[in-house]
Image (cartoon, helix red, strand yellow):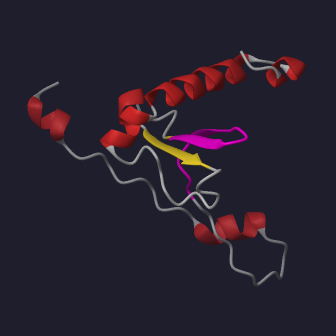
Amino acid sequence: MSWPESCSPSPAPPTPDWPAIRRAVSPPGDTKEVYLIDVPPWSSLRTERYVYTRWYDLERSAAKREYELYDLATDPYELHNLLATAKGRERHAGLVTRLNKRMAELSSCQGATCRTSG
């Protein structure tokens, strides 16, 4: 592949047929609005104290994902992402490692084995 080919923009995705989508999801005569929301893929784990979320889990490499960690004991409304700064990421690196390990365990467990922590 030559340089110009590799840098050319991707073609725009086709415009959705909104009237057809509305007909498919709404009963006949329904005049309510239909909203479609595109949410990026994510994985999340909630413990008694923390909520940990990895955004773009399937679309990006681990280094390019976005991460959120909230301490429910001190931030029950999840307003302060503990991983938003380099200092926060460094401070909570051990916890994130443990939570990533638990998420990996949960991705391959079945039934009652999912209820025990490793």
Q: Position of residue 49 (x, y in %)?
A: 67, 42
Q: Position of residue 13 (x, y in %)?
A: 42, 53
Q: Position of residue 79 (x, y in %)?
A: 53, 61
Looking at this view, is 101 or 17 the one in front?
A: 101
Q: Is residue 107 left or right of residue 99?
A: right
Looking at this view, is 111 or 70 the one in front?
A: 70
What residue is drawn where x is 83% and y is 82%? 29
Q: Does 6 appear in magenta?
A: no
Find the residue positioned furthest to the front. Answer: 74
What residue is drawn where x is 71% and y is 23%? 106
Looking at this view, is 39 or 111 the one in front?
A: 111
What residue is drawn where x is 68% and y is 73%? 34
Q: Is residue 116 above or below residue 50?
A: above
Highlighted range, magenta:
38-54
Q: Is residue 54 above or below residue 96?
A: below
Q: Quadrant of residue 65?
A: top left
Looking at this view, is 113 or 82 the one in front?
A: 82
What residue is drawn where x is 84% and y is 17%? 113
Q: Position of residue 75 (x, y in %)?
A: 59, 56
Q: Does 45 appear in magenta?
A: yes
